[in-house]
Image (spheres, rainbow, N blue to C red):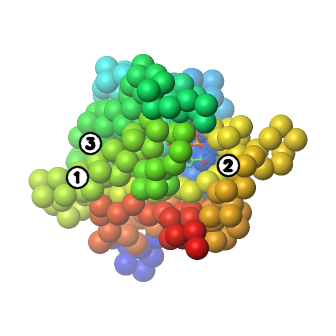
Amino acid sequence: MNRSNPFDLTDKKVLFSGATGVLGASMAQYLASHGAELLLLGRTPKKVNALRDQILAQGGKAWGYYADVTDEESLEKVAQLISAQHESIAVLINAAGGNMPGAVIRPDQTFLDLDTEALKQVMDLNYLGTVFPIKAFLPLLLKNQSGTILNISSMAASRPMTRVMGYASAKAAIDNLTKWLAVELAAKYGPNFRVNGLAPGFFLTEQNRALLTEKDGNLTQRGQQIISHTPMNRFGQPEDLLGALHWLCSDASAFVTGSVVAVDGGFSAYAGV
Ligand SMILES: NC(=O)c1ccc[n+]([C@@H]2O[C@H](COP(=O)([O-])OP(=O)(O)OC[C@H]3O[C@@H](n4cnc5c(N)ncnc54)[C@H](O)[C@@H]3O)[C@@H](O)[C@H]2O)c1
């Protein structure tokens, strides 16, 4: 540990799934601007390469890798490539994920209308899409002698919301996995291996724009309900996540494992009265 600056991220190799997303790209660029070396993992080479080139142009260090997080075979191939090119990694961030329209129970539907295929897809992406990368890349963390895993959860995990049934279930499974793995890694590999979660509240991004705002930009009824249930009275901005991200990726959080940190403007603390 760098005792004079436990927040130091210089030369830490961070493998990042979902790095090309709205929140992912903001987080990846932030880490690179603080000296971390970014190993960007995504399905679409064009998007991954564009982000890599942006980071390089800003003087950061970045490499692109291509895999679907629900495909164990493609993840294994990436793990072999990274092992040959970088030997090990210090941080694994699992941000690939998101809601799927088919797995939503609309107000005019009931649970009996549940599309079980869509439910399987949203569970596959959010839950197995976190489990599989951890299984594939854990050996690279272990080679580093110390390492940390950060799973991107959601408020929907701890405060299940109407409509987004599948997504909420999948993210709840992520919170449980985070705690389970925190215990498992510390017990089997020692205290230098940590697992935490980051649970963003409501951020106006492509995933939820249609649920929260009308075409003219005004809030939907759901958007208004969320704002009125958020003591800070606004949606989050991608930058709001960066302080907690930095802390959880660095040695400054060396005694923190099994935690899911909410960055939600107070949403989860508020009982509504
Ligand atoms: N946007 C929000 O308000 C919000 C709130 C809470 C939690 N989250 C979570 O934060 C994370 C990032 O969200 P975002 O807003 O940046 O989402 P986004 O939709 O902008 O990005 C998701 C990323 O995941 C990647 N991805 C999707 N399926 C994949 C697959 N099968 N294999 C590999 N990559 C795949 C996409 O290419 C993209 O890079 C997600 O896990 C999301 O569930 C978002």
The residue lying at 61 percent from left, 31 percent from top is: 108
Q: What is the total number of numbered labels drawn onto the structure image? A: 3
For the point 53% across and 45% down, the residue is: 162
When the figure is inspected, residue 202 is found, relative to residue 125, above or below; the finding is below
Residue at x 36%, y 58% (from the top left corner) = 196
Asked whether mark 2 lies closer than 8 Å to ligand 1, one says no
Of 241 and 15, the residue lying toward us? 241
Say which element carries label 1: helix
Using the image, tell me which numbered label, if any, was put on residue 180: 1
Q: How crowded is mark 3: few (under 14 residues within 10 Å), some or many (20 or more)?
A: many
| Residue that carries the numbered disc 2 in the rendered image | 222
Pointer 2 or 1: first along the chain: 1
Q: Quadrant of residue 67?
A: top left
**Residue at mark 2 to residue at mark 1: CA–CA distance:** 33 Å
The answer to whether residue 209 is above or below residue 71 is below
- Side of 189 relative to 13 (left or right): left
Please provide percent x and percent y for residue 218: 83, 48
Picture quarter with the C terminus: bottom right
User: Element under label 2?
Assistant: helix
Give the residue type at disc 3.
Leu
Residue 214 against residue 156 in the figure, above or below = above
Q: Earlier in the sequence, mark 1 or mark 3?
A: 3
Q: In this view, does 245 lie to the left or right of 190?
A: right
